[in-house]
Image (cartoon, helix red, strand yellow):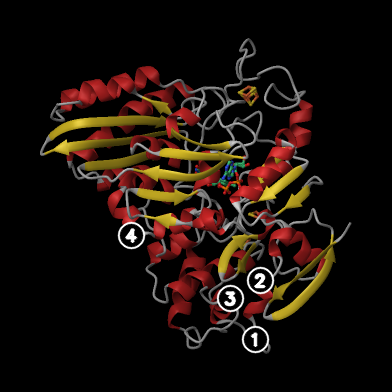
């Protein structure tokens, strides 16, 4: 029997009739066609699948669909508002923090969650906040640089509220 | 990798959870943060017919520091490491929790799940197909233990970071079932057996971890892992001691990841009681711990070397308790300072 899932995705109410054994990652990608969130290790080891759930960054590959009922999910698609990129996304593009791009959505989500809690993190704190997100291309320096750049980029403080702000 | 089919139930109270669990304890499992159970289900290491999700039980997420400290089994590791009272009163617990997995996993993972974490092994933490290719192993679906083919028991490694730290601090746990409630010392929850590593009955729910007031106690946790960013422990040491000035009144040392359960080092208690921590005494206690540690060749790093590291981890822990400045040594081991986003 299918599961009727009613929750909020990127600020909009969403409803889907899903296979109850799916994870949130599978529901997002396969039932809601939100393929920005990436399917990496599927075991909690890489961070590619990170999304905000009720404002907290979680690994969607480990969240069962049943436990999404009524919750608010923000994916990387939700960082862009009216076609305007989030300051983090702009800085990632400007500073070459994304190469193959596979890790980027998860890292953007983890970095947004960090800046929502701590608007002026030190480099060590950024490193800690992103320590569960693996990147096989960049060597991480550009990623840390881009998050640092976003701290001072206009628009950061007002970053898309009501959408996965701190809970 | 897809999850196998299962029936999901979400109780709102511990009583409901306990009575549902009692219906069929043998093929029902509890789901807290899911960071251990969900990967294991995907790899078909654990295939419960029914999963009882605990996240809707508000009573399990309470953290109460009025008399001693009561930590609900459902308190997440993030909540724990962000709590200033935990950090200042139980440094060893804080240090252990801050080194568990990753920030994203700590947002999900709970203290109860960490205490009940499945034991780990190179021949077990693999996909179904991988395990099938070696004809499985004793722990799941097979007969032979590939780590020691003549062994009559599974030697999988206890890999919980928080449990040794909690045991060193004198933690007790509460287990609730439809039949009643029992409290026991956390050490009593474990058995040195990779398959039956918990003495918890399948119909019991761990509800609370209790820590006594830490007056006079100092505690610390030292962990060896492959990567600086995150990894399961391959050897760890939790130490706690109650001091009167420089003199130790009582002490406990518990080793992690060198047996199928957290290993208490009883000689540490007897040797340290009433003493001042001299370099010689530290070396003697480190030898006691070294003798007890039995790492097997079923996790990362070479086992003879892993056993040797126990000696230096114990020495570092005791020196830190003595008041030596161990910050540099800690950063050298972890390769970065211990930080959490508050
Ligand atoms: C990539 C990765 C790295 C990790 N690194 C570490 C690490 O360094 N150190 C470490 O210690 N752990 C590590 N973990 C394991 C895990 O994330 C943590 O141990 C976490 O605390 C488990 O809690 P959970 O709530 O997610 O457990 P779950 O997966 O929900 O449950 C784990 C087990 O406990 C049982 N259980 C849960 N709650 C209860 C309860 N209330 N009563 C009785 N039984 C219960 C479950 O049935 C299950 O068997 C890692 C995991 C991953 C995926
Ligand atoms: S220790 Fe032996 S029986 Fe246990 S999981 Fe490893 S190979 Fe299997
Ligand atoms: S896909 Fe979820 S952590 Fe790798
Ligand atoms: S850009 Fe390729 S994995 Fe990070």
Say which element carries label 4: helix
Q: Are marks 1 and 2 on the same chain?
A: yes
Q: CA distance from mark 2 to mark 3?
A: 7 Å
Q: Position of residue A98 (x, y in %)?
A: 60, 68
Question: Is any part of residue B256 visible from this angle?
Answer: yes
Kindly identify the residue that appears in the image at 56 percent across and 40 percent down: B176
Q: Mark 4 and mark 1 in contact (Cβ < 8 Å)?
A: no
Say which element carries label 1: loop
Kindly identify the residue that appears in the image at 28 percent across and 46 percent down: B213
Which residue position holds label 4?
Answer: B84
Q: Residues within 10 Å of mark 3 (few under 14, many from 20)?
A: many
Kindly identify the residue that appears in the image at 28 percent across and 24 percent down: B268
Q: CA distance from mark 4 to mark 3?
A: 25 Å
Q: Chain of mark 1?
A: A
Q: CA distance from mark 2 to mark 4?
A: 29 Å
Question: Is any part of residue B94 visible from this angle?
Answer: no
Residue A164: assigned label: 3
Q: Chain of mark 4?
A: B
Q: Chain of mark 3?
A: A
As drawn, is A100 to the left or to the right of B91? right
Residue A81: assigned label: 1
């Amino acid at each position: 029997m299918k599961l009727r899932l009613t929750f909020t995705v990127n600020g909009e109410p969403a409803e889907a009739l899903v296979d109850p054994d799916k994870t949130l990652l599978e529901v997002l990608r396969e039932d809601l066609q939100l393929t920005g969130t990436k399917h990496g290790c599927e075991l909690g080891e890489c961070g590619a699948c990170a999304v905000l759930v009720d404002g907290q960054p979680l690994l969607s590959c480990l969240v069962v669909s049943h436990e999404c009922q009524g919750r608010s999910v923000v994916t990387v698609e939700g960082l862009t508002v009216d076609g305007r990129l989030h300051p983090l996304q702009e800085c990632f593009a400007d500073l070459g923090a994304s190469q193959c791009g596979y890790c980027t959505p998860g890292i953007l989500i983890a970095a947004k969650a960090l800046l929502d809690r701590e608007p002026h993190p030190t480099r060590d704190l950024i490193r800690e906040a992103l320590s569960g997100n693996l990147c096989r291309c960049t060597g991480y320096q550009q990623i840390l640089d881009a998050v640092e750049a976003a701290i001072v980029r206009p628009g950061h403080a007002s970053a898309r509220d009501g959408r996965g702000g701190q809970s | 990798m897809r999850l196998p089919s299962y029936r999901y139930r979400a109780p709102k109270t511990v009583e409901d959870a306990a009575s549902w669990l009692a219906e069929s304890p043998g093929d029902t499992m509890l789901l807290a943060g899911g960071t251990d159970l969900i990967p294991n289900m995907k790899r078909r290491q654990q295939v419960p017919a029914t999963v009882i999700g605990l996240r809707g039980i508000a009573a399990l997420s309470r953290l109460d520091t009025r008399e001693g400290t009561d930590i609900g089994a459902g308190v997440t590791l993030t909540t724990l490491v962000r709590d200033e009272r935990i950090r200042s009163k139980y440094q060893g617990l804080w240090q252990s929790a801050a080194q568990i997995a990753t920030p994203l996993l700590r947002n999900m993972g709970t203290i109860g799940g960490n205490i009940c974490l499945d034991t780990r092994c190179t021949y077990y933490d693999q996909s179904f197909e991988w395990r099938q290719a070696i004809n499985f192993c004793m722990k799941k679906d097979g007969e032979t233990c590939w780590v020691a083919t003549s062994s009559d028991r599974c030697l999988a490694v206890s890999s919980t970071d928080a449990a040794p730290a909690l045991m060193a601090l004198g933690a007790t746990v509460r287990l609730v079932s439809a039949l009643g409630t029992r409290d026991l010392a956390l050490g009593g929850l474990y058995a040195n057996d990779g398959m039956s590593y918990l003495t918890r009955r399948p119909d019991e729910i761990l509800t609370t971890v209790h820590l006594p007031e830490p007056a006079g106690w100092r505690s610390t946790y030292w962990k060896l892992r492959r990567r600086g960013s995150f990894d399961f422990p391959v050897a760890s040491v939790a130490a706690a001691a109650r001091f009167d000035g420089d003199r130790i009144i009582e002490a406990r040392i518990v080793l992690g990841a060198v047996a199928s359960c957290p290993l208490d080092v009883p000689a540490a208690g007897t040797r340290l009681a009433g003493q001042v921590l001299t370099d010689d005494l530290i070396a003697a206690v480190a030898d006691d711990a070294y003798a007890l540690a039995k790492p097997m060749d079923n996790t990362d790093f070479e086992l003879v070397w892993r056993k040797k590291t126990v000696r230096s981890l114990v020495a570092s822990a005791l020196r830190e308790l003595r008041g030596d400045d161990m910050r540099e040594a800690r950063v050298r081991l972890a390769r970065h300072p211990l930080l959490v986003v508050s």
